[in-house]
Amino acid sequence: MEISESIKRYKKELGENVTLVAISKTKPASDLMEAYEVGQRVFGENKIQEMTEKWEALPKDIQWHMVGHVQRNKVKYMAPFVSLIHAVDSLKLLKEINKEAEKNERVISCLLQVKIAEEESKFGVEAEELKELLASDEFKSLKHIQVKGLMGMATYSDDEAKVKGEFDYLKSVYDDLKKGHPEFEVLSMGMSGDYKIALTCGSNMVRIGSAIFGERNYN
Ligand SMILES: *Cc1c(COP(=O)(O)O)cnc(C)c1O
């Protein structure tokens, strides 16, 4: 299916209350423009350099989401423009984002990535550590970041019950934290292969790449 048709179809399926992040990593600017022309404004990338190049080249009303693992020494390149950083997994990284946001006179929105899959390769903070992090004085002193919610990646598996169990768990962690953090409003979970399950579990932001733009050759 064409990119523009996919975007329209997903928008319709997701409705008003779920944000579609079009994951455009490895794809050329012309593909992003095809989505842009039918109204898509939120794009996600997983490499800071690639995202920065696309930001420079493309219309300035695009909201850029960084969904990949972030290296601290590269935060400065995206600090002037990034709209949401999904995969924050340490206080150290939050401090770096805060520092660069302050230099740019901005407050940068972030999500904390929670480890919900069994796979060792998946990054994220253990749910028990989250409360501690959010309650620490050091965290509270960071005035140039705002944690807006949580992000998680389920195990890559055909076992729907397993995936659902992991998303249900993330939703329960989110609901629990939200009691003490009314500023929480984003629960980012679900990709091309599992977004339908994520939606039934309460996701309000899905990150869809290959189902819109086609298979990637790498990444
Ligand atoms: C690549 C990526 C996606 C999109 O994956 P698809 O399976 O192509 O939809 C979503 N989230 C993250 C963090 C990614 O790196």
Image (cartoon, grey):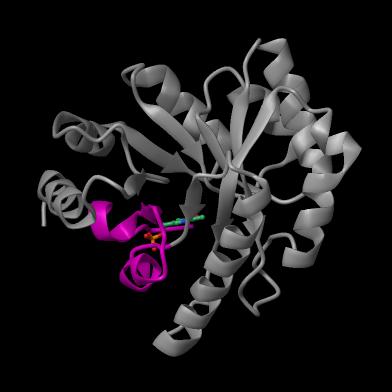
Q: Position of residue 57 (x, y in %)?
A: 37, 19
Snapshot quadrant of residue 131: bottom right
Q: Is residue 119 magenta?
A: no
Q: Toward the viewer: 45 or 191? A: 191
Q: Range of the magenta residues?
A: 190-219
Judged left or right of residue 8, residue 158 is right
Q: Toward the viewer: 60 or 144? A: 144
Give the vertical position of 205 relative to 63 (above or below).
below
Q: Toward the viewer: 19 or 38? A: 19
- Picture residue at 68% right of the left edge, 49% below the top: 180
Could one spot residue 159 in this view of the protein?
Answer: no
Judged left or right of residue 84, residue 62 is left
Residue with the most extreme right position: 137
- Picture residue at 20% right of the left edge, 54% below the top: 10
Q: Position of residue 156 (x, y in %)?
A: 49, 77
Could one spot residue 54 in this view of the protein?
Answer: yes
- Picture residue at 13% right of the left edge, 43% below the top: 4
Q: Quadrant of ligand 1?
A: bottom left
Q: Is residue 204 magenta?
A: yes
Q: Position of residue 100 (x, y in %)?
A: 72, 21
- Picture residue at 57% right of the left edge, 68% below the top: 172
Give the vertical position of 155 relative to 99 (above or below).
below
